């Protein structure tokens, strides 16, 4: 996988995420054994936290601009609406418990790129602020 978003509602085979360099996968780990089937050479495995917990972070770091919980719920709702999936409906109906069994698979390089993008944005904002302060000081001195 090199981009996009995927939600896996069933069991995966062994070596999941081998070569995964982009995008994000959310895997429903019903039996709790997904870690033994995931190749973590290029990815990290994170739990899907609630939107409230994730709001403590800069939203620019979020995959496609949504919290993991909001994105995952939206994708499940869409899947249910488009296909009538009973599995998706059951997961949504038991969301507080279901969310805890989802694992977020996040490529390390993609995570690094998001962090670098945030740092560049912060540096640019700092430079803009410095330029505005200098302009204001010049204006105040000229009076």
Image (cartoon, grey):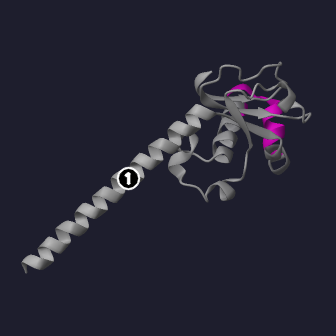
> Hey, which residue is sitting farthest right in the picture?
31
> Hey, which residue is sitting farthest left in the picture?
142
**Residue at left offset 61%, top offset 59%:** 56
Q: Which residue is disc 1 drawn over?
A: 123
Compare residues 86 and 142 and report the one nearer the observer. 142
**Residue at left offset 51%, top offset 37%:** 113
Compare residues 142 and 46 and report the one nearer the observer. 142
**Residue at left offset 83%, top offset 26%:** 10
Describe residue 143's horizontal placement relative to residue 62 as left or right.
Answer: left
Q: Is residue 18 above or below residue 121?
A: above
Q: Is residue 54 above or below residue 76?
A: below
Secondary structure at numbered mark 1: helix
* Mark 1 crowd level (few <14, some 14–19, many ≥20, 10 Å Cα): few
Describe residue 22's horizontal placement relative to residue 6 as left or right.
Answer: left
Figure quadrant of the N terminus: top right
The percent coordinates of residue 120 (x first, y second) are 40, 46
Figure quadrant of the C terminus: bottom left
> Hey, which residue is sitting farthest front in the picture?
41
**Residue at left offset 90%, top offset 32%:** 33
The percent coordinates of residue 102 (x first, y second) are 78, 39
Asked if the stretch drawn in magenta spans residue 33, the answer is no
| Magenta span: chief secondary structure | helix
The total number of labels drawn is 1
Describe residue 30's horizontal placement relative to residue 82 as left or right.
Answer: right
> Hey, which residue is sitting farthest bottom in the picture?
143
Compare residues 95 and 18 and report the one nearer the observer. 18
Start-end of magenta stretch = 80-93
The percent coordinates of residue 107 (x first, y second) are 63, 32
Asked if the stretch drawn in magenta spans residue 90, the answer is yes
The percent coordinates of residue 8 (x first, y second) are 75, 28
Displayed quadrant of residue 73? top right
């Amino acid at each position: 996988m090199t981009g996009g978003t995927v939600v896996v509602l069933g069991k995966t085979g062994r070596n999941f995420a081998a070569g995964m360099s982009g995008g994000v996968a959310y895997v429903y780990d019903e039996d709790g054994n997904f870690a033994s089937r995931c190749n973590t050479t290029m990815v990290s495995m994170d739990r899907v936290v609630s939107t409230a917990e994730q709001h403590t972070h800069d939203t620019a770091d979020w995959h496609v601009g949504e919290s993991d919980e909001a994105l995952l719920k939206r994708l499940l709702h869409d899947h249910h609406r488009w296909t009538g999936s009973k599995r998706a409906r059951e997961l949504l109906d038991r969301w507080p418990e279901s969310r805890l069994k989802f694992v977020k698979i996040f490529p390390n390089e993609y995570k690094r790129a998001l962090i670098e993008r945030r740092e560049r944005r912060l540096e640019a904002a700092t430079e803009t602020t410095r330029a505005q302060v200098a302009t204001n000081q010049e204006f105040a001195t000229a009076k």
